[in-house]
Image (tube, rainbow, N blue to C red):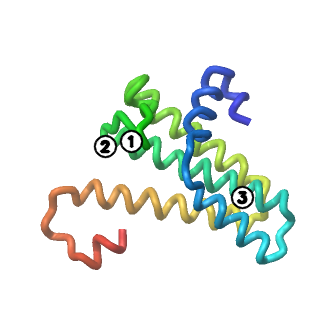
Amino acid sequence: RAARAGELVGDHLADFVGRPGKMLRARYALLMGSALGVDPACSERAATAVELIHNASLLHDDCVDGAALRRGLPTPNGLFGQTAGVLLGDLAFAEGLDEASDLSTSAARRLVDTAREMTAGELQEEFLRGSVKVSVEGYLGM
């Protein structure tokens, strides 16, 4: 689907998403789908959505942290600058939501809610950076 964004852009997204990794979130989605008797095609779509949204968060995190490398490989922001890194993360997020749009309403809603909570937690962490006012419980709640 990323090809709709243009071949060059889609290639860069595919390069980042296709890098070696554990893909634990996608594996969990597939395992849960299998355990619950969900149609395999639906489980694969959910796993793809989860993995794309997770990769979007990694792309954004690399920009926030100014990371030039991830797992020993250059990050998109390290190669092409912060703007490209953020926009590639935005594209991965949009592609993940596009995959989720074909799931049941409740499954898509859970994915969107999780992405919202993840982003809010990152923002809280950013707003509290350097603050000594946050408790251990508050930090872990992020």
Label 2 Cα crowd, 10 Å radius (few <14 / some 14-19 / many 20+)? few
65, 23: nearer the viewer: 23
Mark 1, residue position: 62
Tell me which residue sits at (61%, 39%) in the image: 18
Q: How many marks?
A: 3
Mark 1–mark 2 Cα distance, whole angstroms, equals 5 Å
Tell me which residue sits at (72%, 28%) in the image: 4
Q: Where does residue 58 sit, x and y in percent of width and height?
A: 46, 47
The three-letter amino acid code for the residue at tag 2 is Asp
Q: Where does residue 105 sit, x and y in percent of width and height?
A: 75, 64
Q: Which numbered disc flags the more N-terminal residue, 2 or 3? A: 3
Q: Is 63 situated above or below 12? A: below
Give the numbered dot on residue 51: none
Mark 2–mark 3 Cα distance, whole angstroms, equals 28 Å
Q: Which numbered disc flags the more N-terminal residue, 3 or 1? A: 3
Tell me which residue sits at (56%, 44%) in the image: 20
Q: Quadrant of the C terminus?
A: bottom left
Q: Is residue 112 left or right of residue 36?
A: left
Q: Is 38 situated above or below 96? A: below
Mark 3–mark 1 Cα distance, whole angstroms, equals 24 Å
Q: Quadrant of the N terminus?
A: top right
Give the numbered dot on residue 46: 3
11, 70: nearer the viewer: 70
The three-letter amino acid code for the residue at tag 3 is Ala
Please say if the residues under marks 1 and 2 sit with CB atoms less than 8 Å apart: yes
Q: Is residue 11 left or right of residue 104?
A: left
Check disc 1 and report its element: helix, strand or loop: helix
